[in-house]
Image: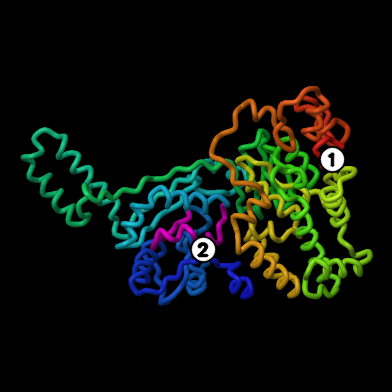
């Protein structure tokens, strides 16, 4: 992992804590939260104040997240909003904590100037014992205060001031005035320098959790679903997976997952995606697949250039990955035109050839696709870092070197640009209109068209040809297939 750390691909943007004042503040917060302190004089912290060095020292990498419930955080500076969130067991936590810091930035800036801020991210579900409990996670509540309870004290003083201003005869209430003076000694002037943190409550429509071996929970699509990474849970008698109004699938049932994505218009072919350089994206995917195959077969990839990889592919013979055929056919179509290659969900290239459609579930769908297209390591690194780091440890040294160099050269230089090139622009905050939602086809919105044939062509789906004829039609295809912009 040292290679990744040196290239800024792991623990990047961590906040360095090396001043005595910061260490002392962190220890006060750590003592309050865990009852323990650190003897380290220098360490690094993530967005939530978790330090891998302290976790190693204490022998507890979950010291801020005991038993995976009610994750706690320690803020020494608002600059932590740029840091990663390590060991996140819920995919939405990083964005929600960043949002909380953004919503209270001026207050947090003032508070962290004199003390550490300690808080909690509460999913309002006391225990998660079965997969059904995950459906109860609807909102995350984030609350915080300093180790000296400055916010609570300021709230008390504010309430006393309000009483003084509104109650009849408060000017003559010596007890009330004395209490205000004593409270002001702790908090300062809350009139000129108000101290208050709003309790943030945020909706959680779709998320991934590491619980139960990894589960994707989708509630924003028309057809709600839970997709389990660990298929053994289906044979475990402890769990009842017959959940009302929720489609339950195993990730290994790729055809069922593909059909669910298609029915809910959650994915689109990369080649026809608006604004995407489909050919360039496919070429990079092919490169990563060839590197993986070459290292497994012991074939030298030379300097790792595209021409060197093509020479390595020529020596693979029967060992050439099956994904290459379908992706190469799509690449030829993108660059030369001709007949659109039909690739259904049974083809190993299928999930490499699609990306999530724009919408609230976009990022989570893209994360799901990284597990279904495991050799696309760039998308895996961007969308699912815990799984990337886990798989990285088992790779051949040659593959580690190639992937690390590619990511450092092509992603680290322009992270936002790379994400937009691969996955499209970030989703807007506005809700889609009901008319637009009802007109959405499996591979994107159906725009105004005359005649059923054109509508059928734009959606790219036809009954009996690997697609869905109509949402009300009971005829369901056995395998969804990629379609070109004008049908088969």
Residue 170's spot in the image, x, y percent?
10, 38
The chosen color scheme is: rainbow
Residue 205's spot in the image, x, y percent?
57, 41
**Disc on res. 320:** none
Q: Is residue 142 above or below residue 168?
A: below
Residue 86's spot in the image, x, y percent?
54, 62
Q: Residue at point 91% right, 67% down?
A: 314
Q: Is residue 92 above or below residue 262?
A: below
Residue 352's spot in the image, x, y percent?
77, 52
**Disc on res. 479:** 1
Of the residues under marks 1 and 2, which one precedes in the sequence? 2
SS for callout 1: loop
Magenta stretch: includes residue 82: yes
Point out the frontmost of discs 1 and 2.
1
Q: Quadrant of the C terminus?
A: top right
Farthest-out residue, top: 451
Q: Quadrant of the N terminus?
A: bottom right
Q: Which residues are magenta?
A: 71-90
Corner quadrant of residue 288: bottom right
Disc tally is 2
Residue 328 placement, left or right of 203: right
According to the picture, the residue beneath numbered tag 2 turns out to be 62
Farthest-out residue, right: 317
Corner quadrant of residue 258: top right
Q: Is residue 16 above or below residue 229?
A: below
How packed mark 2 is, by other alpha carbons closer than 10 Å (few <14, some 14-19, many 20 or more), is some
How packed mark 1 is, by other alpha carbons closer than 10 Å (few <14, some 14-19, many 20 or more), is many
Farthest-out residue, left: 172
Residue 393 placement, left or right of 59: right
Q: Residue at point 64% right, 74% down?
A: 3
Magenta stretch: includes residue 336: no
């Amino acid at each position: 992992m040292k290679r990744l750390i040196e290239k800024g691909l792991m623990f990047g943007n961590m906040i360095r804590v090396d001043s005595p004042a910061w260490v002392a503040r962190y220890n006060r917060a750590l003592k309050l939260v865990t009852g323990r302190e650190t003897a380290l004089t220098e360490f690094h912290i993530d967005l939530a104040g978790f330090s891998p060095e302290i976790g190693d020292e204490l022998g507890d990498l979950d010291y801020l997240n005991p038993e995976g419930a009610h994750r706690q955080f320690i803020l020494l500076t608002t600059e932590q909003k740029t840091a990663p969130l390590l060991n996140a067991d819920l995919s939405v936590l990083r964005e929600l904590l960043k949002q909380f810091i953004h919503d209270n930035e001026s207050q947090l800036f003032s508070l962290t100037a004199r003390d550490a801020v300690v808080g909690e991210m509460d999913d309002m579900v006391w225990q998660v014992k079965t997969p059904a409990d995950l459906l109860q996670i609807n909102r995350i509540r984030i609350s915080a205060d300093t180790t000296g309870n400055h916010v609570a004290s300021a709230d008390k003083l504010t309430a006393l001031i309000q009483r003084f201003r509104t109650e009849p005869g408060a000017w003559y209430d010596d007890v009330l005035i004395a209490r205000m003076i004593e409270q002001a000694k702790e908090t300062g002037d809350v009139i000129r320098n108000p101290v208050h943190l709003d309790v943030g409550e945020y909706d959680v429509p779709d998320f991934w959790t590491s619980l139960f071996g990894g589960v994707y929970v989708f509630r924003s699509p028309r057809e709600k679903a839970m997709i389990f990474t660990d298929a053994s849970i289906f044979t475990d008698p402890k769990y009842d997976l017959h959940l009302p109004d929720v489609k339950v699938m195993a990730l290994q049932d790729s055809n069922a997952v593909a059909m669910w994505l298609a029915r809910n218009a959650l994915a689109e072919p990369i080649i026809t995606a608006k604004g995407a350089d489909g050919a360039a994206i496919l070429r990079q995917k092919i490169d990563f697949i060839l590197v993986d195959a070459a290292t497994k077969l012991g074939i030298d990839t030379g300097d790792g250039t595209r021409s060197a990889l093509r020479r390595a592919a020529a020596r693979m013979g029967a060992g050439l990955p099956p994904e290459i055929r379908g992706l190469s056919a799509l690449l030829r179509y993108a660059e030369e035109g001709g007949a659109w290659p039909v690739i259904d969900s049974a083809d190993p290239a299928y999930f490499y050839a699609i990306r999530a459609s724009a919408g609230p579930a976009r990022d989570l769908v893209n994360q799901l696709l990284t597990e279904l297209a495991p050799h696309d390591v760039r998308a895996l690194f961007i969308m699912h870092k815990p799984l990337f780091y886990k798989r990285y440890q088992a790779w051949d040294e040659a593959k580690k070197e190639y992937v690390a160099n590619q990511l450092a050269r092509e992603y680290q230089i322009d992270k936002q640009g790379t994400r937009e090139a691969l996955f499209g622009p970030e989703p807007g905050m506005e809700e889609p209109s009901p008319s637009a939602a009802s007109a959405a086809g499996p591979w994107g919105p159906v725009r105004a068209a005359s005649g059923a044939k054109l509508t059928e062509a734009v959606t790219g789906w036809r009954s009996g040809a690997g697609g869905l004829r109509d949402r009300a039609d009971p005829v369901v295809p056995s395998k969804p297939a990629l379609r070109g912009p004008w049908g088969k």
